[in-house]
Image (tube, helix red, strand yellow):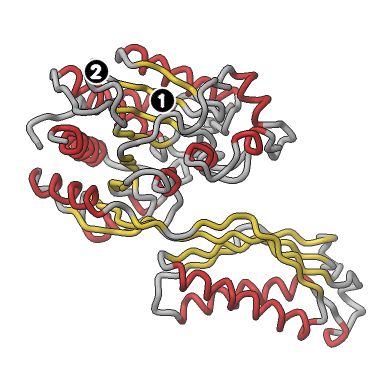
């Protein structure tokens, strides 16, 4: 599998060029889904697809596909590669973009080498993976896999009051293809780890065998506003204190467990939000994750029991809104083993691992055999301009993707 290599100069040059698109006046990288800056990134990606001689297709949710379908195999189910090019606010340059550009690079390398695949190979850039402007995240791949109706998704109102369908039309990426028009034979996503495991263990590659389940909830606690100086502690209905108890409950429960469960309160707002007023309302999010569905359900139930008891103890009213719920995903064993074999043949250290973050791969796994390849992230940092992966590691990951693609399209 390992007698081909990608063009490191082309891959790294494109990563840098795409990483320069969408900078604001302070130098921050911001390419939110369907925004003006993301249009610029989309336009650049499409120009590279066209220059590579691939067919461009865009579906109704704005997913972009570069299709290589050599004569004689055009009717076969394609092998799909990809990720996303939208970003968070003040992002790094690798998250998502690496998988998209490496997928394109693999196709170009194979075409230039005269390789004839047994089926089409497609590179995809999915819409709104980050979910910063429009919810839920991983929207484009979720719609593509049939998990969300396309018209419902297009009607989604963003944080700025815009409607996704209107914005896709405005920037020229409201395609005419039905989501799912290509059903993949298999899907592979190359990605930076976004965590510290590979770097800590001195490994170059992760063969990702599963992905954590995710539970997102919004909790609202209602109490009474009152004077911070004149109201005795025993007479308070303090929504802020009750919220703090939830945060500590989640943290202490996770610390005491011998499981990989993690819990995070990432957003919190108080009302009236005044220094000398007891909060009458606290609204916050809870992010629970675990690679085991039973454990994830148990954590949700434990939180529900705690909130019920807390309501009585603190004399507050508590309501919960479900924001998102994705079951854990087990990736395809054959593809995971193929990744391991490719790493072995190139003498690159590799381990099986779990993805702690959500990815488009977890959605496409609903309709096709799927797996992921990880390369190290320095310090485990991501969603941050300090996000960094060494050039040699980026190239090695792309070469492994190349080998896996060859293996899956060579002898089938």
Residue 175 percent coordinates (x, y): 54, 21
Q: Residue 30 versus residue 191: which sits nearer the camera?
A: 191
At horizontal 89% and vertical 69% (from top left) the residue drawn is 225
Q: Is residue 98 visible?
A: no
Circle 1 SS class: strand
Residue assigned mark 2: 70
**Dot 2 crowding, Cα within 10 Å, few <14, some 14–19, many 20+:** some
Please tell me which residue is depicted at 81% across the width and 76% down the height of the picture. Answer: 316
Whole-percent x and y of residue 27? 52, 30
Question: Hey, which quadrant is residue 121 in on the image?
Answer: top left
Question: Can residue 136 be seen here?
Answer: yes
Spatial separation of the CA atoms under disc 1 and disc 2: 16 Å
The numbered mark, 1 or 2, whose residue comes first in the sequence reads: 1
Q: Quadrant of residue 197?
A: bottom left
Name the side, left or right, on which 285 lies relative to 299.
right
Q: Is residue 393 above or below residue 306?
A: above
Q: Is residue 88 left or right of residue 393?
A: right
Picture quarter with the N terminus: top left
Relative to 90, say whether 376 is above or below. below
Choose between 364 and 119: the one closer to the eye. 119
Q: Nearer the viewer, residue 285 or 381?
A: 285
Q: Position of residue 329 (x, y in %)?
A: 40, 56
Measured as percent of width and height from the top left, residue 317 is found at 81, 73
Q: Find disc 1 in the rendering and name its residue.
A: 65
Q: Residues within 10 Å of mark 1 (few under 14, many from 20)?
A: many
- Of tags 1 and 2, the one toward the viewer is 2
Tell whether label 2 touches label 1 (CB within 8 Å).
no
- Which residue is painted at 20% across and 25% down in the image? 7
Q: Is residue 65 left or right of residue 60?
A: left
């Amino acid at each position: 599998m390992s007698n081909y290599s990608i063009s490191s100069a082309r891959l790294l040059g494109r990563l840098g060029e795409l990483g320069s698109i969408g900078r604001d006046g302070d130098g921050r990288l911001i390419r939110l889904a369907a925004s003006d800056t993301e249009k610029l990134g989309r336009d650049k990606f499409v120009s590279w697809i066209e220059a590579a001689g691939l067919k461009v297709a865009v579906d109704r949710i704005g997913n972009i596909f570069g299709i290589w379908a050599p004569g004689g195999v055009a009717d076969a189910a394609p092998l799909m590669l990809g990720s996303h090019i939208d970003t968070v606010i003040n992002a790094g340059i690798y998250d998502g973009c690496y998988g998209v550009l490496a997928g394109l690079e693999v196709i170009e390398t194979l075409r230039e080498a005269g390789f004839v695949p047994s089926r089409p190979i497609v590179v995809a850039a999915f819409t709104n993976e980050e979910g910063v402007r429009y919810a839920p995240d991983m929207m484009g791949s979720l719609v593509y896999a049939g998990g969300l109706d396309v018209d419902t998704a297009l009607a989604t109102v963003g944080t700025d009051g815009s409607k996704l369908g209107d914005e896709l039309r405005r920037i020229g990426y409201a395609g005419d293809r039905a989501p799912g028009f290509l059903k993949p034979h298999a899907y592979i996503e190359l990605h930076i780890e976004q965590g510290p495991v590979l770097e800590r263990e001195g490994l170059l590659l992760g063969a990702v065998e599963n992905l954590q389940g995710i539970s997102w909830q919004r909790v609202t606690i209602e109490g009474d506003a009152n004077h911070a100086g004149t109201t005795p502690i025993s007479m308070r209905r303090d929504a802020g204190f009750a919220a703090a108890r939830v945060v500590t409950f989640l943290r202490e429960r996770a610390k005491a467990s011998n499981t990989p469960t993690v819990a995070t309160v990432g957003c919190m707002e108080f009302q009236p939000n005044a220094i000398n007023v007891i909060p009458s309302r606290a609204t916050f999010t809870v992010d629970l994750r675990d690679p085991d569905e039973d454990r994830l359900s148990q954590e949700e139930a434990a939180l529900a029991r705690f909130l019920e008891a807390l309501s009585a103890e603190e004399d507050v009213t508590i309501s919960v809104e479900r924001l998102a719920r994705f079951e854990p995903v087990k990736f395809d064993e054959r593809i995971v083993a193929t990744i391991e074999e490719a790493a072995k043949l190139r003498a690159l250290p590799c381990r099986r691992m779990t993805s702690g973050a959500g990815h488009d791969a977890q959605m496409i796994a609903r309709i096709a055999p799927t797996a992921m390849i990880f390369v190290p992230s320095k310090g485990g940092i991501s969603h941050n301009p300090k996000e960094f992966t060494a050039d040699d590691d980026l190239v090695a990951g792309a070469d492994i993707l190349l080998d896996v693609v060859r293996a899956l399209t060579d002898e089938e």
